[in-house]
Each structure stands twice: as structure tokens, then as C-alpha cells.
Amino acid sequence: MITMRPSGGYVAAVRGQNNSCDVVFIATGISVPRTPRAAQGSEFIETYDSMSVDPQDYINKSVLIFGNGNSAFETAAALGDVVAYIFLVGKRRLRLASDTFYEGDVHATANNLVDSYHLKSLDAVGEHDLKNTPSIVEDGELLRIMSPGFVMQFKSRQRYRKRLEAKQEYKTGAEGRYSDAFLETHPEIGRKYLEMRAGYDDTDGSSWNIDLWGTHKLIMCYGFAFNETVFTGLLPCQRETEDCPEMAPAPGRVQIAYRHGLVNQQEPIQWQSSRTQDFADRAWPERTYPTMTDMFESALHPDLFFIGATMHSNDWSNSSGGFIHGFRHLIAGLHNALEFARHQVPWPSTQIPDVTPGAITEALVTRGSCWE
């Protein structure tokens, strides 16, 4: 755990031993899965660290995945061969790397679900505003998603349905001689089709269609957050608000400020392409990238530097600083900058004795082809 010294500098406590230091480099990465938020029933949502990796647990199951980034699509690709169908729903427009030219968006190697969706398979990709936190209610072998205010009414309907089922009076439109024949020839979609044709539909009046938002498995793939454990000894707060008790100011505690809001604060343009509008609406992921200077130094604490994936804070959605083939060069650049600023060691350079266009071109090609 790292704390600040009253006289300046930092103290790193490692295995019960305190080590004083003047400069700290944080390389804890973005490694903590985001926890589910639900007004009721969050225990039914699985995450990266809790979901089963055994394909047998998903055979012929319906799976609803929250999220539409690389994590969500990679999870869908891993389950696609065994599940009945996958419904992937995100909070924003789907961004494909082939459209945005940003490698943090969905790669072609992971987006097979887009093809199965466009080719009219049972899989689907959608968008839904999840700011109004839903509730999750168990309904037999399915999990139902609904508005919190509809839970009591839905449970009342459940009890009424059970009474009708006990009397064998429960009807959904999927009964009768014609229906039996139709179900035999259409075993996958027959019952659902007949129920919808008969007008059988539960809705809570708040855009949650209870019949539609029913699934065997709920998996949350909302990405990862910055690991604050090195400063607090606790996992980071995952609530949307900033008033996290574990990060309340305290003597010697290192505070982390995060980038938030829209990346490009600009006035909306009346006529523009969907890609331009998408960039204008792009918001920072919650509690992920600490604020820092151009030299990756903490905006709140001098001599505290961030290295690794968190360096992406300075070029998120624009370049490759969040990936190893990108931040390895940023780390090398930071090393050279600190060597020059603190020890007057000049940046590495190549002397060209014969300053001619041909010699300069040859040096540039050699340097650009050299992987160090």
C-alpha cells in the first residue's frame, strides 16, 4: 500500500516493511471487472470472475450479455457453439474497429455475432439505456428483467398464473390441435410465435418487455476499472457516484481523480456523419483512466507516474496507448524524458555524418524498421 509522507515523497508498505521513495510508478493496470448494478437480483448476474467456463453449463440455454465491446463479443464467440441463442445489448451504438479505425473498438475476429444477427439467426444485437437500474426476478428456469416498480405486480401475476396452471386453465395461445402440429414442425420458435400472435405479452410500461427480456443466463461484460488496491487496500468503488467511502480523504492517502464526461466537449453539428456524431458522443469509461499530465504524471500528486495500460488516458479512443504494442513505446519515451529532466542524459539519437537527402532517408528507414 502506498501513502504520502508529510515531508514529501511516498511510503510503500510491502509485506509489513515500509520503504521510503521519492518517485512512484504505478503499473497496476485496468484489471478489476465491473460489478453488476441492479435494484434487486444482482446475485443472478454473472461476471468475468464468476461465470462458468464449462460449455456444458450453457448447452441449449439462452444468454443475455450486457455490453457491446470486445469483452462482450469475445464472450459471445466463446459460447456461440453451444447456446440456443445470444442477445447482446449495449448502452450505446455498436462501434466496429473497421469503422472507427480505433483498435479499442470491436475487432473483426470477435464480431461473428454481427453476421449471425444480420443473417437472421436467433442471435440479436441491440441497444438499451440502462441508466434506470432494472430489477431481476427469477421466473422458473428463466430470469426476468423489469423496472423496480413492476416487481410486485409481476410476482402477483406469477401467483395468479400458478393457480391457473393448477386448474389447467392457463392459456397463452400455443394450445389446440393446430398449435400442436405447428410446434412439431417448428420446435425452436413455434411456441414463441404462437404466443406473440395471440397477443400474449407481459410489459411493465417502462420499455421493459418481460416476455422479451427473459433468459437463462445473465452475463455482465462492462469491461474493467482501474485497480486502486495499491492505494486503499480495498477494491475500487463501482458505483456511478464519486462519494466512495473507501476513497474518502484521509491523512497520507493518495487520491485518484478520473477522466469523465464526454471526450470531445463541443457543440453539436446539425449535419454530420454517424461516425462523426459517434466520436462527439463518446464518453470516458467510468473510473478507468486517472487524470495525468502529458508526461503521465498524476494531476494531483507530483512524482507519481502511471505506466502501462493506464497511459491510454492521454490518447484514449485515438491511438494505441492502451495496448502493449503502444504503451511499450510510451514507457520508453517516459524513461528518456525523465533521464533528461533529472540526470541531464540526452535522448538517444543517431548522428548522420553525411547530411544528404539519401542519407537521411536511409537513416529513417533503418530506424523505422528497427524493433527494440
Image (tube, grey):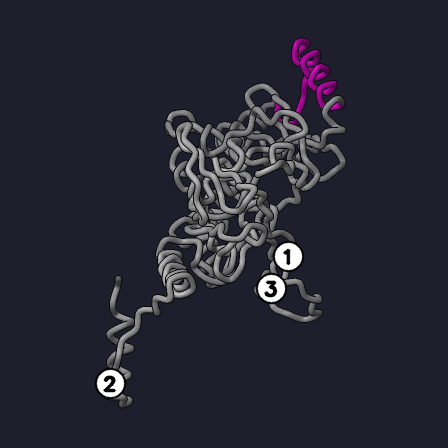
Residue neighbourhood size for the residue with mark 1, other residues' Cα within 10 Å, grouped as few (<14), some (14–19), many (≥20) = some
Cα distance between the residues tagged 2 and 1: 46 Å
Three-letter residue code for mark 2: Ala
The boundaries of the magenta stretch are 153-175
- Determine whether 102 is above or below 47 in the image: below
**From the viewer's perspective, is the residue at label 2 or at label 1 nearer?**
2
- Determine whether 207 is above or below 233 in the image: below
Comparing 212 with 304, the one in front is 304
Residue depicted at x 71% and y 69%: 270
Three-letter residue code for mark 1: Leu
Q: Secondary structure at mark 1?
A: loop
First-in-chain label (1 vs 3): 1
> Is residue 95 found left or right of 78 in the rendered image?
right
> Is residue 326 found left or right of 10 in the rendered image?
left
Residue 274, quarter of the rendered image = bottom right
Please say if the residues under marks 3 and 2 sit with CB atoms less than 8 Å apart.
no
Residue that mark 3 sits on: 274
> Is residue 200 found left or right of 47 in the rendered image?
right
Residue depicted at x 70% and y 38%: 132
Residue 14, quarter of the rendered image = top left
Magenta segment main secondary structure: helix
Residue 337, quarter of the rendered image = bottom left
Residue that mark 2 sits on: 359
